[in-house]
């Protein structure tokens, strides 16, 4: 049985609106106008135990709203969902002890207390055995490199230090399902890599199921074999990351380094020219023609080095959103469930 299931899960919000100006403000005291905003629109997916799934979309796509419903913070206005066999918004204590939500934009730490005090409170709230909890805490402190920040008030921590503490808080009671909403936001590249390594290690060691949202494609490519792409509250793609690239980017990118300057050469006969420097040229060619074009380049030009790559995943995701913006857009991929 999948650990996470959503069936036609929907959420709408009633939002007040009015014109600008004093007269409009006075009028709204008597007659307020509202409109209905659909944040999540009948989404369907299922996630098996131990999967790390990237949940991708632009700002306002419905990612965080979906996570809030799956963790029980919001009630849906339609559809159903189960996590670990439980209905999330019933918020049964046994369910809450098995999940964790980390939001890069929100903190669960006590702002004016040292991080160590927050950890102690967390273990008490979740009824963690003192001996086992202390062992787990020491392990997490070592893995995340938190030794130097435990006694500092949380308000004095850098964003990177705080995010590591948030992860530690979230894992003290060994949850089976992790909902990670932008866990590396605002963190430097080195710290992003450490957090990714930590998440992957926790998944391997404990078989945890992870849903990850991130605007950093390095997070997704390093951790996720499967991605769900959502925009305007609807799922546009659900399947392997590699399949997304093959479906929406039917081309390869060829980069060549030359022995001498390429000025004046006509590269359009090989493919679409997307970048050119004195001795470096980048071409976009059809996927099925890549091998032939590479052979011609090697035969026709003084090539020092040649690479054939898939397009950056950022470009692929961008094509998904471009497809969704069309008036009669249809989902660009079938559900993998």
Image (spheres, helix red, strand yellow):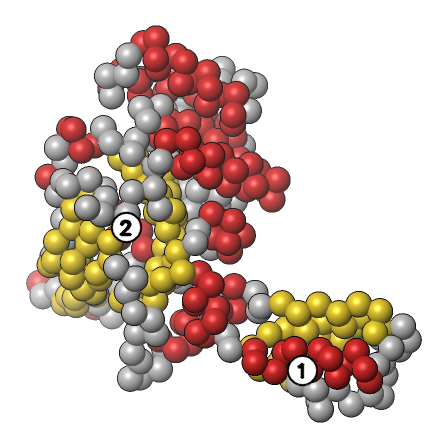
Question: Is residue 265 rendered to the left or right of residue 129?
Answer: right
Question: Is residue 4 rendered to the left or right of residue 302?
Answer: left
Closer to the chain start, of discs 1 and 2, is: 2
- Return the mark for residue 47: 2
Q: Nearer the viewer, mark 1 or mark 2?
A: 1
User: Which percent across, then down, holds residue 20?
Assistant: 28, 68
Q: Which residue is mark 1?
A: 292
Residue 105, image quadrant: top left
Q: Are marks 1 and 2 in contact (CB under 8 Å)?
A: no
Q: Residues within 10 Å of mark 2 (few under 14, many from 20)?
A: many
Element class at badge 2: strand
Element class at badge 1: helix
| Disc 1 to disc 2, C-alpha distance | 40 Å
Q: Residue furthest top?
A: 131
Q: Nearer the viewer, residue 332 or 35?
A: 332
Q: Residue furthest right?
A: 260
């Amino acid at each position: 049985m999948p650990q996470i299931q959503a069936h036609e899960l929907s959420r709408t919000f009633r939002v007040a609106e009015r014109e600008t100006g004093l007269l409009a403000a006075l009028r709204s005291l008597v007659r307020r106008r509202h409109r209905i905003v659909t944040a999540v629109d009948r989404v369907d997916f299922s996630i098996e135990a131990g999967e790390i799934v990237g949940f991708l979309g632009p700002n306002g796509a419905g990612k965080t709203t979906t996570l809030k419903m799956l963790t029980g913070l919001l009630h849906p206005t339609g559809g159903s969902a189960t996590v670990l066999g439980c209905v999330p918004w019933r918020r049964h204590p046994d369910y809450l002890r098995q999940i964790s939500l980390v939001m890069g934009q929100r903190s669960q730490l006590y702002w004016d207390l040292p991080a160590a005090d927050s950890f102690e409170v967390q273990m008490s709230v979740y009824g963690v055995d003192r001996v086992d909890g202390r062992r787990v805490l020491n392990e997490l402190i070592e893995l995340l490199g938190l030794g130097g920040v435990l006694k500092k008030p949380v308000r004095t921590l850098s964003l990177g230090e705080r995010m590591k503490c948030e992860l530690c808080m979230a894992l003290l009671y060994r949850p089976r399902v992790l909902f990670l909403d932008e866990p590396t936001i605002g963190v430097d590249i080195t710290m992003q890599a450490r957090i990714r390594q930590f998440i992957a290690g926790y998944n391997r060691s404990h078989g945890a199921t992870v849903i990850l949202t991130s605007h950093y494609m390095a997070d997704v490519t390093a951790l996720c074999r499967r991605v769900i792409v959502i925009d305007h509250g609807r799922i546009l793609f659900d399947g392997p990351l590699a399949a997304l690239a093959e479906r929406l980017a039917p081309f390869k990118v060829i980069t060549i380094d030359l022995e001498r300057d390429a000025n004046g050469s006509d590269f359009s006969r090989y493919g679409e020219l997307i970048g050119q420097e004195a001795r470096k040229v980048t071409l976009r060619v059809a996927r099925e023609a890549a091998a032939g074009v590479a052979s011609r380049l090697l035969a026709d030009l003084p090539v020092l080095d040649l690479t054939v790559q898939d397009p950056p995943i950022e470009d692929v995701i961008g094509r998904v959103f471009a497809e969704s913006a069309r008036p009669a857009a249809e989902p660009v991929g079938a559900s993998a469930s």
